[in-house]
Image (spheres, grey):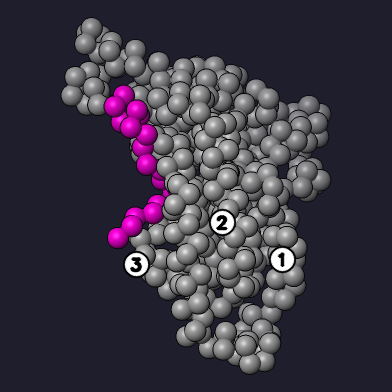
Amino acid sequence: MKRIYMDNQSNTKADERVFESMKPFFIEYYGNPQSIYSFGSFSKNALETARRQVADLINADAEEIIFTSCGTESNNLAVKGIAGALKAGGRHIIISSIEHFSVLNSVKRLEKEGFEVSFIPVDGNGNVDGSELKKALRKDTILVSVQYANPEIGTIQDIKKLVSVVKENSNAGKFVAFHTDAVSACGTIPVDVKDLGVDALTFSASVMYGPKGAAALYLKKGVRISPQMDGGIQENYIRSGTENIPTIVGFGKACEIAKDEIVKNGKAVQKLRDRLIAELPRRIEHIYLNGVRENRLPGNVNFSIEFVEGEALFLLLDAKGIMASSGSACASKNLKLSHILDAIGIDVAVGQGSILFTLSKFNTEEEINYVLEEFPNIVKRLRDISPLYSYFLKTGSRKAAGPGTDFDDHCTTTIRRID
């Protein structure tokens, strides 16, 4: 059976060059980088080389890079750490309504500690409006966090513009930190922290052909942060714990490769993406693109499909060797719509049939052909046993099909986006 992996927003296959770069640090150069003996210097030098490689990808200075274990840890460190350091100037935080759970749950924790949080709405494509951000700013605002690119619907925010809104409208020139979760952006599209003007940025090796277990927080020089773990001197006392040298070396190599190949890979992946976006609606009726058509992550394809149920959809895809993911929580047997699709106004009945293909540089035209051949057959098979679809065919009515199925307006709007 074929095995076609199209869930690259969760994890990517490691590049062979990344794997090879890591191997010596498991069995040859395994000394502690903080040790005083010479053997440890191999690890220390590798650590600092990787720091420069990681910094170069986003046009940062090496000393502005803090290594962590994953994007979730980096987001926790950024949100909780910056809020803790700046709380003397206020306790108000602003985030968008489509942030990753590591940001959402971090601010929920901070709310229990006396902070106030404002959630900025997004439009039907997942874009944050600068005017909404401006309205949310208060005298006691200390931190804004807006995701650079959403991994579920692919929308890329105009972070530079949003940073300008914050800097230009902060009360009496007061410093308000701007953090962006760029896990889905870095290594996929060019990212330049100096051009963006952000104060903190999260990114991770695991979705840019690097290893799991390595990530980073960019922290602009001069921005204060409170450590979230007590321990030793590592990472300038900000993130204690023995550094995971093999994965950090792999992260550095992944960043080096990405810097050289990001444009080439982006064009190739986008070509595959555009085939799916263009051809699936020609083969399947009542299918709607979620997110923007342009200014979208090059590998992101997210459709909502009427009259199918998500869990069954993924079981049948898996049986054909196609690995994708869902915007809904159906895979966990929870019919609640994902907070991303809910935020952009997707009807529950449609959103339960959402599917997300995220492509990588390892996907091929042949794999796209296979998906285009098999996926419509799976949808047809599910619709053939769907009472809602049978009712729709007989009556032409969605509204009478059951609770939560009044989505004519959504369908009309989304069809225009596809065309």
State the residue lying farthest toward the bottom. 394
User: Residue 381 — which label?
Assistant: none
Q: Residues within 10 Å of mark 1 (few under 14, many from 20)?
A: some
Q: Is 238 on the left-hand or right-hand side of 407?
A: left
Q: Earlier in the sequence, mark 1 or mark 2?
A: 2
Q: Is 330 on the left-hand or right-hand side of 240?
A: right
Q: Amino acid at mark 1?
A: Ile
Mark pair 1, 2: CA separation: 15 Å
Q: Nearer the viewer, residue 74 or 79?
A: 74
Is residue 269 placed above or below 59 in the rendered structure? below
Residue name at image x 78 percent, y 43 percent = 130
Mark pair 2, 3: CA separation: 20 Å
Q: Amino acid at mark 2?
A: Leu
State the residue lying farthest toward the left. 27
Residue name at image x 60 percent, y 30 percent = 191
Q: Residue 144: x percent and y percent? A: 66, 39
Q: Residues within 10 Å of mark 2 (few under 14, many from 20)?
A: many
Q: Is 323 on the left-hand or right-hand side of 245?
A: right
User: Residue 415 — which label?
Assistant: 1
Residue name at image x 81 percent, y 45 percent = 131
Q: Residue 391: x percent and y percent? A: 60, 90
Q: Nearer the viewer, mark 1 or mark 2?
A: 2
Q: Report which quarter residue 238 is drawn in.
A: top left
What residue does disc 2 label? 276
What residue does disc 3 label? 319
Task: State which region is magenta.
Answer: 1-22
Q: Earlier in the sequence, mark 1 or mark 3?
A: 3
Magenta segment: does it hold 20? Answer: yes
Q: Which corner quadrant holds the C terminus? A: bottom right
Label 1 sits on a secondary structure element that is: helix
